[in-house]
Image (cartoon, rainbow, N blue to C red):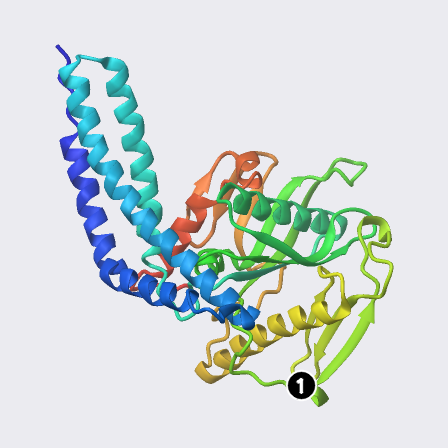
């Protein structure tokens, strides 16, 4: 007779889930959905497409959040029924299915628990991620492209919409830099722990002697703010350059000079954009990113916190936050949290959730806030 019991495990999950629900505040979330639904139902909503997009996007995000909470609650109830049926039918296959569901729920609730720690001012915003090759020559530009692929695979696995906003290809291999947007709830809070200098150690495929090479790349993460942000940029503070979009090998992508580079003269901040087909669209997108960067810079200066949010990243020795070692052994280790795995291939294929969760928890420690 099968004696199958998961009651202690299920009770532990229910206790964690109850704590999460109290932080999320389901009643407030439901009220917010009702408010946004009413706003989305206004007949003339789409007379202002930008406002309509914001309302419908916010509504969709809140509905997804509530659906996730409700779905977990149902799955916990169903899991208890699965355990009862497995015992009643003396069915080991049904018991194994229940164990599998328990493991999945532990993972889902664990991820949601981490998300409840994301309570910073901009944590719920979409993220703009910029990757730049650092010290290490052609290996560094190749490493930068490896990191770009890693983050794109991670976003794809989570079904997060991604837009490549700008990219600059290196002459021999890889990229000099790339900027992309991740448009998902809490994308900034989630990815902000990835900001810093990343270090790669491997046998260089670009070295004929096959020597071990160390290279660096910098990752910057900023929140993408609403267009009506508090930062006003006078035209006199801007230099606008227009150029032709290009792909690998310098091949022309667009037939017109539609790419735009904005330089904020007082701070030297530069933003390039070439994703859109028209110069006007690229300028608008670049301006939005520039405003986001300047607002972060402004808040850093006001608070006198040098590495708050996007931070200052040098991409060289002595500043790395994560090491990817491919030779003489295989390991990826976060130097802040000590979280590590021995499968770099999986990490470069987008398996980043463990590193991100460890980073968010580390940042929330009372004794260490991520400085």
State the image quarter where residue 108 is shown.
Answer: top left
Q: How many marks?
A: 1
Decide which of 350, 49 is in the foreground and name it.
49
- Going by the picture, which residue comes out furthest to the front? 43
Q: Quadrant of the C terminus?
A: bottom left
The residue located at (76%, 65%) in the rendering is: 278
Residue 254 position in % (x across, y down): 83, 57
Residue 285 position in % (x across, y down): 65, 68
Q: Quadrant of the N terminus?
A: top left
Q: Is residue 87 above or below residue 71?
A: above
Decide which of 86, 4 is in the foreground and name it.
86
Decide which of 183, 247 is in the foreground and name it.
183
Q: Is residue 245 above or below residue 235?
A: above
The residue under label 1 is 266
Q: Is residue 202 visible?
A: yes
The residue located at (33%, 47%) in the rendering is: 68
Label 1 CA crowd tier, 10 Å (few <14, some 14–19, many 20+): few
Residue 279 position in % (x across, y down): 77, 69
Residue 228 position in % (x across, y down): 53, 78
> SS class of the residue under badge 1?
loop
Q: Relative to residue 47, is residue 23 drawn left or right?
A: left
Q: Is residue 134 visible?
A: no
């Amino acid at each position: 007779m099968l004696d199958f019991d998961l009651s202690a495990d299920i009770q532990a999950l229910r206790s964690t889930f109850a704590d999460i629900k109290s932080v999320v505040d389901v009643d407030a979330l439901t009220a917010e959905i009702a408010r946004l639904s009413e706003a989305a139902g206004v007949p003339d909503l789409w007379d202002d497409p930008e406002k309509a997009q914001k309302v419908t996007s916010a509504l969709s995000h809140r509905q997804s959040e509530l659906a996730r909470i409700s779905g977990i609650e149902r799955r916990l109830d169903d899991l208890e029924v699965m355990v009862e049926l497995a015992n009643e039918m003396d069915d080991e296959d049904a018991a194994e299915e229940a164990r599998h569901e328990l493991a999945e729920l532990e993972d889902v609730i664990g991820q949601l628990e981490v998300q409840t720690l994301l309570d910073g001012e901009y944590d719920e915003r979409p993220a703009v991620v910029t990757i730049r090759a650092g010290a290490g020559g052609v290996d560094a530009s190749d490493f930068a492209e490896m990191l770009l692929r890693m983050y794109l695979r991670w976003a794809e696995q989570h079904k997060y919409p991604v837009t490549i906003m700008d990219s600059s290809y290196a002459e021999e291999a890889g990229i000099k830099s790339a900027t992309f947007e991740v448009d998902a709830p809490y994308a900034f809070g989630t990815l902000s722990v990835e900001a810093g200098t990343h270090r790669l150690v491997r046998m260089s495929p670009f070295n004929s002697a096959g020597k071990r090479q160390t290279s660096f790349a910098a990752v910057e993460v900023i929140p993408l703010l609403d267009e009506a942000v508090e930062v006003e940029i006078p035209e006199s503070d801007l230099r606008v350059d227009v150029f032709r979009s290009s792909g690998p090998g310098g091949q022309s992508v667009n037939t017109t000079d539609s790419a735009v580079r904005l330089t904020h003269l007082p701070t030297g901040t530069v933003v390039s954009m070439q994703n859109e087909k028209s110069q006007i669209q690229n300028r608008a997108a670049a301006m939005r990113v520039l405003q986001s960067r300047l607002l972060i810079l402004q808040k850093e200066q006001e608070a006198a916190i040098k590495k708050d949010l996007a931070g200052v990243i040098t991409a060289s020795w002595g500043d790395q936050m994560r090491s990817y070692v491919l030779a003489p052994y295989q390991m990826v280790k976060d130097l802040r949290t000590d979280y590590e795995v021995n499968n770099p291939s999986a990490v470069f294929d987008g398996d980043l959730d463990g590193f991100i969760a460890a980073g968010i928890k580390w940042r929330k420690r009372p004794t260490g806030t991520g400085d």
